[in-house]
């Protein structure tokens, strides 16, 4: 149980990152601590040594002006005042003349001291007994004495020492601080890593749980959003937006298949009825019924073709076929194709194109889309009306507009007319499959543009901005 | 005409077979790619109808193979794929025309006949004549009973195409494809208005009509039904 939990934590990236940071931090803390420790101690030692040298200098001066006896008296006085100082006046045979050789610890002999003094430039380090009266003032660990041997004349030499004072206590305190600081930091880092890993794992688990729900079919679920604006909230936000997109696409697919089922059932029912009647070949209008059936089937085929075409365009597989299209000549071809149809309905059809004529696009798709727009206009503009096909080429992009004096599209329907099979209620009975504008929309999206439907007061103004080649 | 049909769907091939036979053509059917290839290599045909997706060897490879072997028999490709890219691929592989399933038999017949005629007509023709209608392809002059008829450029192209296919059905899709070189499906029968304009100029003032409508299919240009 506990091992499992530990194992889980060990697998957590955050936990391992936490530990790594802890390790790096500890190393740097240790280095810094050690640096401070070392510098502080060496500075204190330096200070002590210079004080010792100063005192030796003073004693040497006193000796040369006042002689041995005066110095001996002075030493006795000094020793009575301050037991942390140590004086030992020796003769040339390393025998004590004055001072407190009695306080020397048992393990040290005078011969040893004199020998060492020759090796280490006179510097000595030894231990002293502390007189009883002063025990309280001097901590136990500070009985080390820093001392130096110095020759006063050919006959006499002096060892002056001073107890280490607080060097050792500082060393102890710093050791103590370093050990506990490091320990505390490691403990904090471990706890912190656990907490961090736990909180991150918790938030990720929420996201994972929602993804599982979605995978099991509940597409309405969304990632939980925190109060803050951190990375997890950004992630949740992005995932939610992606899910919204997917849901709307799926709704689109569902509504398309619903529409297909609905809109094709009607002609299929009619066709089936006709075929049933045809079982009796003696009827007078047998031939016209056969022709009617074929027409019905043809219209269904056309509807399917249009649907497939839209799907194919929306899939965007043909993006590679983008090329430079001369819009002026393309629009002239459209005008040539539709002008007679407009004239037959006594509609005044005009084409006006100015400026740059090249756009980047797919020639066949643009022709199809624009012909759908013109076709629609001719279908809905009443006799005697007007249709203007206007192209204005600019250096940064071109604007195509098809405006007419027809009935227009009510604002409420402007977005919906691009949906597959959607038709304005007043046109439900006219010829058409409700796919013309869907195809235009698909072509516009294919070119990464948008077709806008504006009011022409009266009529419709279709505006389409195309990218410059 | 001798026509080779390579199509694996037996309902479709039977439909094509009976239709072509009742129009007086001699039809051979192959239901598999490699079989079709060996028949095409052994015998000579006036035209071939090849399905794109075939067992054994796919239609495009088959066409490429016979073209490499120097066989220039006109080929009509049949396919359930309507993508423009597919059409372009089919034509690049050596096909002469492309028809998407499902199709009307008369459309298929009209296209096969147009293909065969196109391959037999010499390209250096400078004038065409049907009955008392004469067009000069160089000066773009049109004469009916020696009276000049003024035509707009598109009307001239339509008439030229119909005259090159005189006596044969040309469908609306064929006319659109020949005169407007875009791959697109018009929402309405926009081509009908063009034909009726052409009729106004060619037929209206004369006792004999040359342009006839074939209901549900297209048009025929000729002196009699």
Image (tube, helix red, strand yellow):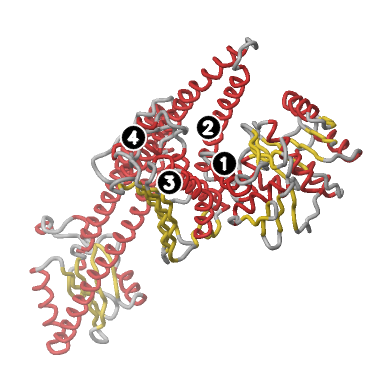
Q: Are marks 3 and 1 on the same chain?
A: no
For the point 35% across and 29% down, the residue is: A220
Secondary element type, mark 2: helix
Per the model, the C-alpha gap separating discs 4 and 1 is 58 Å
Farthest right residue in view: B42
Asked if labels 1 and 3 touch by Cβ distance under 8 angstroms, the answer is no
Q: At which x and y percent is residue A235?
A: 35, 43
Asked if labels 1 and 2 touch by Cβ distance under 8 angstroms, the answer is no
Q: At which x and y percent is residue A319?
A: 54, 50
Per the model, the C-alpha gap separating discs 3 and 1 is 16 Å
Identify the subunit bearing mark 1. Answer: B
Disc nearest the viewer among 3 and 4? 3
Q: At which x and y percent is residue A337?
A: 53, 49
Q: Quadrant of the N terminus of chain B?
A: top right
Q: Residues within 10 Å of mark 3 (few under 14, many from 20)?
A: some
First along the sequence among labels 2 and 4: 4
Q: Are marks 2 and 4 on the same chain?
A: yes
First along the sequence among labels 3 and 4: 4
Asked if labels 3 and 2 touch by Cβ distance under 8 angstroms, the answer is no
Identify the subunit bearing mark 3. Answer: A
Q: Is residue A53 above or below residue A349?
A: below
Asked if labels 4 and 2 touch by Cβ distance under 8 angstroms, the answer is no
- Report whether residue B77 is seen: no
Which residue is identified by label 2? A303
Q: At which x and y percent is residue A59?
A: 16, 81
Which residue is identified by label 1? B192
First along the sequence among labels 2 and 3: 2
Quarter-of-image position of residue B141: bottom right
Q: Are marks 3 and 4 on the same chain?
A: yes
Which residue is identified by label 4? A223
The label shown at residue A346 is: 3
Secondary element type, mark 3: loop
């Amino acid at each position: 149980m506990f091992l499992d939990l530990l194992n889980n934590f060990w697998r957590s990236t955050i936990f391992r990152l936490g530990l790594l940071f802890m390790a790096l931090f500890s190393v740097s803390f240790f280095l810094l601590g050690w640096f401070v420790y070392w510098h502080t101690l060496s500075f204190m030692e330096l200070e002590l040594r210079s004080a010792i040298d100063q005192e030796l200098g003073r004693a040497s001066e006193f000796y040369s002006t006042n002689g041995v006896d005066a110095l001996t008296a002075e030493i006795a006085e000094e020793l009575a005042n301050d037991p942390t100082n140590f004086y030992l006046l020796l003769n040339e045979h390393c025998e004590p003349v004055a001072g407190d050789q009695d306080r020397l610890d048992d393990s040290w002999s005078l011969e040893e001291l004199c020998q060492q003094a020759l090796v280490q430039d006179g510097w000595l380090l030894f231990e002293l007994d502390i007189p009883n009266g002063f025990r309280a003032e001097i901590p136990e660990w500070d009985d080390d004495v820093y001392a130096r041997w110095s020759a006063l004349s050919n006959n006499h030499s002096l060892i002056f020492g001073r107890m280490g004072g607080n060097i050792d206590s500082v060393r102890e305190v710093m050791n103590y601080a370093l050990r506990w600081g490091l320990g505390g930091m490691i403990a904090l880092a471990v706890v912190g890593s656990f907490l961090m890993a736990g909180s991150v794992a918790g938030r990720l688990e929420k996201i994972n749980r929602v993804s599982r729900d979605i995978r099991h079919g509940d597409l309405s679920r969304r990632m939980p959003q925190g109060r803050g604006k951190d990375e997890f909230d950004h992630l949740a936000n992005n995932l939610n937006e992606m899910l919204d997109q997917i849901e709307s696409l799926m709704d689109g697919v569902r509504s398309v298949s619903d529409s297909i089922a609905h809109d094709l059932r009607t002609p299929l029912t009619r066709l089936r009825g006709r075929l049933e009647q045809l079982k009796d070949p003696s009827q007078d209008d047998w031939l016209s019924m056969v022709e009617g059936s074929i027409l019905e089937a043809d219209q269904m085929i056309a509807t399917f073709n249009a649907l497939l075409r839209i799907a194919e365009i929306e899939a965007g597989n043909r993006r590679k076929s983008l090329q430079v299209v001369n819009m002026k000549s393309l629009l002239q071809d459209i005008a040539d194709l539709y002008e007679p149809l407009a004239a037959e309905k006594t509609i005044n059809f005009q084409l006006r194109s100015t400026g740059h004529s090249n756009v980047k696009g797919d020639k066949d798709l643009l022709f199809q889309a624009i012909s759908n727009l013109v076709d629609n206009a001719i279908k809905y503009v009443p006799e005697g009306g007007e249709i203007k096909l206007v192209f204005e080429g600019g250096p940064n992009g071109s604007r195509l507009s098809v405006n007419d004096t027809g009935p227009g599209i009510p604002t409420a329907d402007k977005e919906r007319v691009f949906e597959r099979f959607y038709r304005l209620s007043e046109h439900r009975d006219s010829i058409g499959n409700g796919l013309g504008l869907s195809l235009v929309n698909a072509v516009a999206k294919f070119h990464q543009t948008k077709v806008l439907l504006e009011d022409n007061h009266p009529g419709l103004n279709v505006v389409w901005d195309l990218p410059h080649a | 005409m001798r026509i080779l049909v390579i199509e694996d769907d037996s309902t479709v091939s039977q439909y094509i077979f009976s239709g072509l036979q009742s129009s007086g053509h001699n039809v051979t059917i192959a239901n598999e790619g490699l079989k079709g290839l060996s028949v095409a290599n052994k015998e000579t045909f006036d035209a071939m109808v090849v399905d794109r997706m075939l067992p054994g060897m796919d239609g495009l490879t088959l066409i490429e193979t016979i073209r490499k072997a120097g066989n220039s028999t006109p080929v009509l490709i049949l396919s359930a794929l309507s993508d423009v890219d597919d059409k372009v691929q089919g034509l690049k592989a050596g096909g002469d025309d492309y028809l998407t399933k499902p199709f009307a038999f008369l459309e298929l017949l009209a296209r096969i006949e147009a293909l065969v005629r196109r391959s037999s007509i010499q390209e250096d023709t400078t004038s065409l004549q049907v009955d008392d209608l004469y067009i000069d392809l160089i000066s773009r002059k049109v004469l009916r009973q020696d009276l000049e008829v003024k035509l707009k450029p598109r009307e001239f192209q339509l008439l030229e195409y119909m005259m090159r296919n005189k006596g044969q059905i040309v469908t609306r899709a064929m006319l659109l494809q020949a005169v407007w070189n875009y791959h697109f499906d018009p929402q309405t029968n926009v081509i009908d208005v063009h034909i009726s304009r052409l009729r106004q100029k060619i037929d209206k003032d004369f006792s004999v009509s040359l342009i006839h409508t074939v209901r549900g299919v297209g048009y025929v240009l000729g002196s009699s039904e």
